[in-house]
Image (spheres, helix red, strand yellow):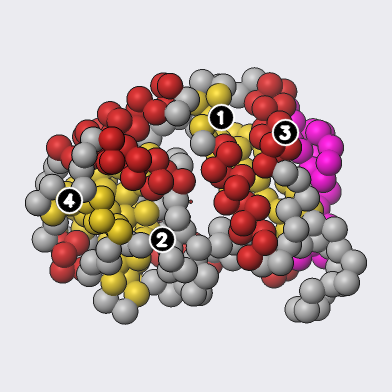
């Protein structure tokens, strides 16, 4: 039996969700996914700082502090004896009779649970195929919101094409994947979309930036288009669950690889995991 955290209590996984929860009816809430390696949280502080920010951006006051969220995670790891996996956290605006406008008296509802998951070793080793797709999402992709329909539809398109990810393109610019950040390498320099309202500033992206700086690999937060994507020396994607995953094919174009820069970043990222950063 899995022990979950629901609204202030640890309990078994048989909770009753209220059908008037605004997360359920409007996607009115935010979430995070935090990685656990060998029973230890990885970059949890950064994830919870982003959770508090995402909540604030949609005018929800996060019910807990960063330290309190970390403490609950530690307890969930312990209670579920989790070694390798993830912790999912979501906070919704709360329960109220259906009305688009914010309710006057609603308490945020928090759900946190763990699930087992291994590292994505095969994709990291061999590389993966991606497709390109139009970025049809809203203009606040910096908020890790529960509204994921644009992401979900593009991810499904990728899966149906036998690919792992959809690289999204808005107005001729590569933004990010449906659930990952996207990078190209040209002449030894890494390029990735700037951290603005059009992408989620991935925590993995921030660790990769740190690794690149330590390895003295130029890291440019600059936009690039689909032509540059196809002409890149290397392409890779990143996320909490994908880590540094090289891309070996974009649509019908075989890029080849995995390349040497992705390999160096994988190694540096692995050292961060081992040392707990
Ligand atoms: N971009 C999107 C749209 C995502 O959903 C995610 C993660 O789920 C990321 C980027 C990568 O973020 P992180 O590295 O914090 O997992």
Disc assigned to residue 189: 4
Describe residue 15's horizontal placement relative to residue 49 as left or right.
right
Q: CA distance from mark 4 to mark 2?
A: 18 Å
Query: Tags 1 and 4 in contact by the CB under 8 Å rule?
Result: no
Q: Quadrant of residue 98?
A: bottom right
Residue at mark 3: 72
Q: Residues within 10 Å of mark 2 (few under 14, many from 20)?
A: some
Disc assigned to residue 270: none
Q: Residues within 10 Å of mark 1 (few under 14, many from 20)?
A: many
Residue 30: x and y in percent read 64, 57
Residue at mark 1: 41
Residue bounds of the magenta highlight: 1-24
> Residue at (39%, 28%) from the top-left corner?
272
The mark that comes first in sequence, 3 or 4, is 3
Height in image: 189 above or below 210? Answer: below
> Residue at (67%, 61%) from the top-left corner?
56
The mark that comes first in sequence, 3 or 1, is 1
> Residue at (27%, 63%) from the top-left corner?
222
Residue 169: x and y in percent read 32, 70
Residue 95: x and y in percent read 84, 62
Depth check: give the residue in front, 196 or 25. 196
Describe residue 113's horizontal placement relative to residue 122 as left or right.
right
Q: CA distance from mark 3 to mark 1?
A: 11 Å
Task: Report if the beta carbon of the residue with label 4 is closer than 8 angstroms to ligand 1.
Answer: no
Helix, strand or loop at disc 2?
Answer: loop
Q: CA distance from mark 2 to mark 1?
A: 24 Å
Query: Tags 3 and 4 in contact by the CB under 8 Å rule?
Result: no
Q: Quadrant of residue 106?
A: bottom right
Helix, strand or loop at disc 3?
Answer: helix
Task: Report if the beta carbon of the residue with label 2 is closer than 8 angstroms to ligand 1.
Answer: no
Q: Quadrant of the N terminus?
A: top right
Residue at mark 2: 195
């Amino acid at each position: 039996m899995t022990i979950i955290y629901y609204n202030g209590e640890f309990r078994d996984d048989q909770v009753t969700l209220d059908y008037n929860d605004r997360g359920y009816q409007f996607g009115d809430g935010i979430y995070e996914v935090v990685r656990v390696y060998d029973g230890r949280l990885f970059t949890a502080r950064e994830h919870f700082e982003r959770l508090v920010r995402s909540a604030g951006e949609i005018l929800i006051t996060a019910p807990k502090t960063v330290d309190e969220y970390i403490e609950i995670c530690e307890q969930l790891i312990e209670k579920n004896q989790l070694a390798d996996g993830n912790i999912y956290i979501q906070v919704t605006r709360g329960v109220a009779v259906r009305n688009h406008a914010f309710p006057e008296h609603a308490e945020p509802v928090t759900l946190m649970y763990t699930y087992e998951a291994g590292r994505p070793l095969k994709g990291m080793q061999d590389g993966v195929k991606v497709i390109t797709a139009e970025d049809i999402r809203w203009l606040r992709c910096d908020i890790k919101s529960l509204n994921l329909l644009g992401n979900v539809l593009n991810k499904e398109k990728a899966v149906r094409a036998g690919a792992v990810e959809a690289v999204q393109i808005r107005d001729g610019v590569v933004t990010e994947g449906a659930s990952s950040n996207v990078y190209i390498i040209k002449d030894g320099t890494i390029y990735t979309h700037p951290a603005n309202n059009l992408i989620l500033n991935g925590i993995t992206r921030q660790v990769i930036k740190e690794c690149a700086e330590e390895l003295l690999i130029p890291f440019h937060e600059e936009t690039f288009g689909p032509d540059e994507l196809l002409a890149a020396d290397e392409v890779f994607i990143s996320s909490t669950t994908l880590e540094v995953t090289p891309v070996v094919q974009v649509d019908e174009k075989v890029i080849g690889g995995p390349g040497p820069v992705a390999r160096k970043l994988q190694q540096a990222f692995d050292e961060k995991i081992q040392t707990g950063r």
